[in-house]
Image (cartoon, rainbow, N blue to C red):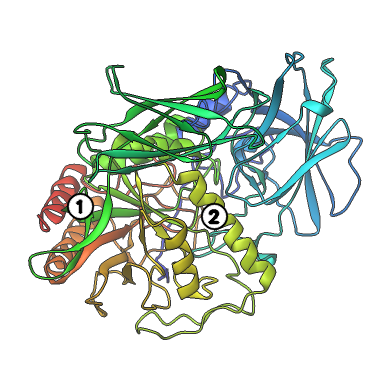
Amino acid sequence: MKKTLIAATALFCCYQGFGQTAGTQKDIITPWGENLEKNKDEIPWTEYPRPQMVRDKWLNLNGIWEYTITTKGADIPKQFEGKIRVPFALESRLSGVQKNISEKEELWYAKTLSIPKNKKGENILLHFGAVDWRTTVYINGIEVGSHEGGFTPFYFNISPYLKYDGTDRLIVRVWDPTDKGYQPIGKQKMNPGGIWYTPVTGIWQTVWLETVPEIHITEIKSLSDIDRSQLYVTVFPSSREIPLTTKITLKDTTGQIVATATGLAGEQNIVSIQNPILWDTQNPYLYDMQIELFDGKKKVDEIKSYTAFRKISMGKDANGLYRMYLNNKPLFHLGTLDQGWWPDGLYTAPSDEALRFDIEKTKEWGFNMIRKHVKVEPARWYYHCDKAGMLVWQDMPSGEIHNDNRSEWKPQNMNDGRDASRTAQSKDNYYQEWKGIIDMLYSSPSVVVWVPFNEGWGQFDTEEAATWTKKYDNSRLINSASGGNHRECGDILDLHAYPAPSMFLFDAERINVMGEYGGIGFPVQGHLWKDDGNWGYISFKNGDEVTMEYKKYADILIDLIKKGFSGSVYTQTTDVEGEVNGIMTYDRKVIKMNEQMLKEINQKIIETLK
């Protein structure tokens, strides 16, 4: 994204959060954030965090923890300087801290646990939804394990380290170099401005305990084949030393059993069903799934999940143009660029209701797709998309964006532009994180497109990255470089043009999409992140003007659909910090366009391809 400055005058709504100084540029707050600040003792994010693998025995650890900041490499602190609300990042208002931290420092968390002694043959797992970036965990002063990655979940078995006397001490060390490192960071920057946003450090998703049997299910993967009316399910056990079996039971929305299958754990099992109801954007039908794990005849573990029957593919229309197909029918993907940022929580929505709100509004406006832009959301976000029938194009968060070895971006030509030169360590870290993201989202029916790179940001070995992604998951389409250095690989050629859509390149052998356009700016006073430097690609003074400009671009887009575009992404769902080109303001309090007209325009766009 490039930017054009527009003038704006900001009138701030003043809210006072604990640990925050009034009058900062972060004074705007969402309605859900307001509620959380009014109820300071309320534990945020109490919903079960992993909807596709549910167990009953779990304990939410969100809420108030202790924190301190030390120099990098320091010993475990004996004293902590203050309180922090988990799971909100250190820099966010809702954390109660709102401090910045450098790459020369580390952030420490502490919490005393009171855990009943587990039964014989049970283990207690400590789960983290996501922590940015390098995490080391200690129980009672003993290092339990470490993890690198700001967007993927991880866990440790902490049973051997617990005393179960109410004094067990959990310590978490976090180091995050933000744009001083090689790791994926998306749009974070130490000195934010323009299209770059406030850094996010530390725990930013739910932390929770789970009691599991000694032999238990660690992961499941489900993939449907609608052409054969089959579902392929792999159940991964914690132990492969003994033969284990699994039973998979599929139920419809009334609770009636429609199919069962048994087989070996760790192997792909086939569940056959007659005339499955297909999941699509108009009828997002989900089947409940019960998975049991057996050691001989003894059931040792059980989880609840869900799945769907749907197919994403590419095919030629009557004019010989490649289109995206959903369930063997062409469908135009009409989406918004969704950054997933919040003025009060930064990476973390103030609540599950807030997280769902953005998806539901996007659906109400007539869009059928969201491009999740260089960020990965908590598992519940994808669950809400699965339930809503919202297609998702999932970006890989960018890394190596601001370093000297960055790529030379030439978006107007094919096979042009220089890829970034990244170290072996940097490349390994990319694939480690990308694999974890794909594993996390593999069973989500809403996710239909993988996007390894955006606009040349850290783009490297493009053909190899696209090939690796397709080989690791060939059930989805690969958008190898959204608006980036275009290479003849993957399934999609993705162009970016601002403000109006434009088809300046075309590939007759792939799907062609308008991966970013629009960016219509409208600064709404009283709902701005800062008082100057706000910008959009083009500026208007009221919602009627914004709506009519959107319609003008829609008319251009409709003509380009007839010429070959199969998808488009409008920038963007909400304002973000200094960007005022959202359909909604950053605090989600003002919708800038005429919603009924927006929906009617979008319906006309989608119907162009029918």
Picture layout, residue 94 above or below residue 420: above
Q: Which mark is residue 86?
A: none
Quadrant in which the N terminus appears: bottom left
Where residue 258 appears, as percent x and y from the top left, is 28, 23
Towards the viewer: 298 or 567: 298
Q: What is the three-letter code of the residue carrying label 1?
A: Asp
Dot 1 crowding, Cα within 10 Å, few <14, some 14–19, many 20+: few
Please identify the quarter of the rendering in which residue 548 is found: bottom left
Residue at image coords 29%, 53%: 335
Towards the viewer: 177 or 244: 244
Q: Which residue is mark 2?
A: 435
Q: What is the three-letter code of the residue carrying label 2?
A: Lys
Dot 2 crowding, Cα within 10 Å, few <14, some 14–19, many 20+: some
286 sits left or right of 544 in the view: right
Badge 2 marks a residue whose secondary structure is helix
Where residue 391 appears, as percent x and y from the top left, is 31, 47
Q: Earlier in the sequence, mark 1 or mark 2?
A: 2
582 sits left or right of 186 in the view: left
Where residue 404 appears, as percent x and y from the top left, is 64, 79
Picture layout, residue 389 above or below residue 24: above
Q: Which residue is mark 1?
A: 544
159 sits left or right of 521 in the view: right
Picture layout, residue 163 above or below residue 607: above
Badge 1 marks a residue whose secondary structure is helix
Residue at image coords 42%, 71%: 2
